[in-house]
Amino acid sequence: MVSLNEIFDQQYYLNHNPDVANAIASGQVSSALDHYVKFGQFEGRSPRSLFSDFYVFGDSFSDTGNVFALTKGIFPDFPNYQGRFSNGKIWIETLAEKLSITANPAYNFAVGGASAGTQNILNFLDPNNPGKPVPISYDPLPGIQTTIDTFVAQTSSADPNALYVIWGGSNDYVGFASTDVETTVHNLETSINKLAAIGAKNFLVPNLFDLGTLPLARQSSSDVKERLTKVSQEHNQALSEALIGLEQSKKVNIINLDVSSLFDDIIAEPAKYGFSNVTDDFLTSGTTNPDPYLFWNIIHPTTLGHDLIADEAAKAITSVPEVLEIVQATRSVPEPEISLLGYVLVFGLAVTVLRKLKYC
């Protein structure tokens, strides 16, 4: 059975959440543990140090400068922020901060333009001159499968205490105009299998937001918009089913990040999230402040949009049931399994006992 000290580190929680001490002093909660159970787990507050590091595989939504380096500074150029496809830090960087991880840039293998397979859309289109041949000033760019294969070939054993992020598929459907959901999802599934085979245990896998809501889609024909909406829905359904199978067969922990529902809600109620424009992109708006915009360009979110993805990811990771799964996955010697409900009940009982004993 998972012990309480494997889930919760009181000193860590207080150090990283100074407001909790004030809440205890004012009598709002009885202890740091009480705060985590009542509030923190739903706010994305980590109960302890959960991961040793981040390894990131994906496309431009997670690229912190790889395409910029590989194209020798050609793309994405100013006003994009330091080689990112946005106006500031992106979600993966903000999430690392939320989880108190000093993310090593060398462990981010996401490459803008990458498909879920071996192709990269930027090898076929000049990003600065759409429709024209790609410049020959840089080597062909990889797809996600290529980066995974390279990593596996160079890594005899993956860190079982790290978090492995795999997010892809959008370039398959937007850039290559594919409707072959089965192949795209299979490629993502294969990526997880290859990393699991060398010891990776915990995976964060986002789904796709409705690609039909992209400014690019809104500027296209109704057929394009409808195709992208349909393929996004089909992708998410197939991905969900594949991840369930992987978790059951490979004995790995899959953390699902529902970006689709998040963006649906943002677009339905933009003011709730601080946006006034969720249909157009900032770069072609002629305005000077990107903050009211969900989209930085015709495909990518602004930094504020990325922040919301990071918030959602933190909440998915730090809930009590998920923390229990993370602990279980990274144990070197698996304990006898009990139901997830059983874990939650045991944890809740422990909290009650600790309150009565005034342990915390």
Image: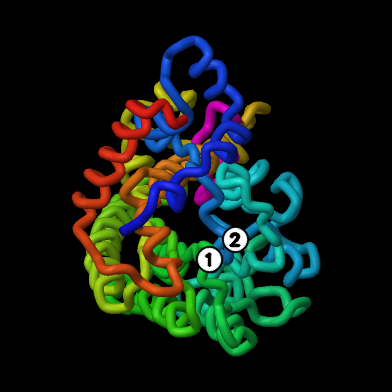
Q: Is residue 280 above or below residue 109?
A: above
- Residue at figure coordinates x 50%, y 66% from the top left: 164
> Where is residue 90 shown, x and y percent of the image?
60, 47
Circle 1 sits in a helix, a strand or a loop, which is it?
loop
The picture quadrant where one finds residue 136 is: bottom right
Q: Nearer the viewer, residue 166 or 348?
A: 348
Q: Main secondary structure of the magenta part?
A: loop
Q: CA distance from mark 2 to mark 1?
A: 6 Å
Q: According to the image, label 1 marks what residue?
A: 161
Query: Disc 2 marks which amino acid?
Result: Ser
Q: Nearer the viewer, residue 62 or 246?
A: 246
- Residue at figure coordinates x 43%, y 49% from the top left: 7
Q: Is residue 289 above or below residue 11?
A: above
The picture quadrant where one finds residue 176 is: bottom left
> Where is residue 82 shown, x and y percent of the image?
75, 51
Chain part drawn in magenta = 291-303
- Residue at figure coordinates x 48%, y 74% from the top left: 200
Q: Nearer the viewer, residue 106 or 341?
A: 341
Circle 2 sits in a helix, a strand or a loop, which is it?
loop
Tell whether 13 sits left or right of 3. right
Q: How many marks?
A: 2
Tell whether 241 sits left or right of 131. left
- Residue at figure coordinates x 59%, y 89% from the top left: 153
Q: According to the image, label 2 marks what residue?
A: 52
Q: Mark 2 near mark 1, Cβ–Cβ under 8 Å? A: yes
Q: Is residue 177 in view from this perspective?
A: yes
Q: Is residue 289 above or below residue 131?
A: above
